[in-house]
Amino acid sequence: MKKKLAFALMLSVALAMTACGQNETAEAENNTEAETVLNQADTEKSEGVMTYEEYMAADLETEVTVETYVQAKQGWWENDGVGMATFYTQDADGAYFLYNMPCSQEEYDKLVIGTKIKVTGYKSEWEGEVEIIDSTFEIEEGGFEASAVDVTDKLGTDDIINYQNQLVSFKDMTVEAANDDGDAFMYNWDGSGSDGDDLYFNVSVNGETYTFTVESYLTGAGSDVYEAVKALNVGDTVDLTGFLYWYQGVNPHITSVTVK
């Protein structure tokens, strides 16, 4: 009797371990599938949706409809009772900057990195920054998280604008003085701000200097990148990642800094 009981217990344990192993395998496969989804943007557009090429060819102040994926978002706020936020988005071919897109707090919370959305609004431009304004959106099935493209060698060339609003990286940049006092950064573009405001800092490569920004509405005081820029020293060599925002020229919104 004891032998039969022992055998039954051993069989139960073996079956449990097999089931556990199968669950772990299934979970691993599901995680792999999820990772694959987040790294594959749909190349086919729904009916009535523009390709990135068609969007860029569209005239300013005309209505546009695109399908794109959230890559980052600025803080949610209300204007006359209407909630809104600005989003950095991208598909397989290019990026779309959604400026002050109306959304409720609940909708904003759902728009996490990788979320696919269909957006209808008006193509606009401000100081060279091409964006979509006065828009509406709906969440769709699918997901995509962009990888940063190294555009260091594009700086100073006409080709750099083709990466506008995309997640990009810059390698082996040298930190230069941000003002005549030799500071490594300034609060606001003219140094008039204080902790919590945008950070502006200069970096150079191949003899040319560029001004980069840490946008406080995107990554404010206390965030890793905000504190990293505050700790920079003139002469540091850094790798940078961010979104290729445009203001009268290249003015990336930096989201990551690595001091080498």
Image (cartoon, rainbow, N blue to C red):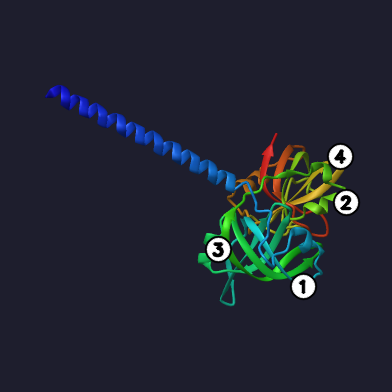
Judging by the rendered image, the residue that carries numbered circle 3 is 108
Q: Are marks 3 and 1 in contact (CB under 8 Å)?
A: no
- Is residue 241 in sight in this rendering? yes
The answer to which image quadrant residue 257 occupies is top right
Between the residue at mark 1 and the residue at mark 4, the CA separation in whole angstroms equals 39 Å
Q: Is residue 218 above or below residue 256?
A: below
For the N terminus, the quadrant is top left
Q: Residue at x 69, y 37 (%)?
A: 259
Q: Residue at x 62, y 51 (%)?
A: 144
The answer to which image quadrant residue 85 occupies is bottom right
State the mark number for residue 206: 4
Residue density around tag 2, few if under 14, some if 14–19, many if 20 or more, within 10 Å? few
Q: Position of residue 15 (x, y in %)?
A: 30, 32
Say whether disc 3 or disc 2 marks the residue closer to the N-terminus. 3
Q: Residue at x 25, y 26 (%)?
A: 10
State the mark number for residue 62: 1
Judging by the rendered image, the residue that carries numbered circle 2 is 158
Residue density around tag 3, few if under 14, some if 14–19, many if 20 or more, within 10 Å? some
Q: Are marks 3 and 4 in contact (CB under 8 Å)?
A: no
- Left/right of residue 232 with respect to residue 7 in the rendered view: right
Q: Position of residue 5 (x, y in %)?
A: 16, 27
Of the pair 104 and 58, the residue shown nearer to us: 58
Between the residue at mark 3 and the residue at mark 1, the CA separation in whole angstroms equals 26 Å
Secondary structure of the residue carrying numbered label 4: loop
Secondary structure of the residue carrying numbered label 1: loop
Say whether disc 2 or disc 1 marks the residue closer to the N-terminus. 1
Between the residue at mark 3 and the residue at mark 4, the CA separation in whole angstroms equals 41 Å
For the C terminus, the quadrant is top right
Say whether disc 4 or disc 2 marks the residue closer to the N-terminus. 2
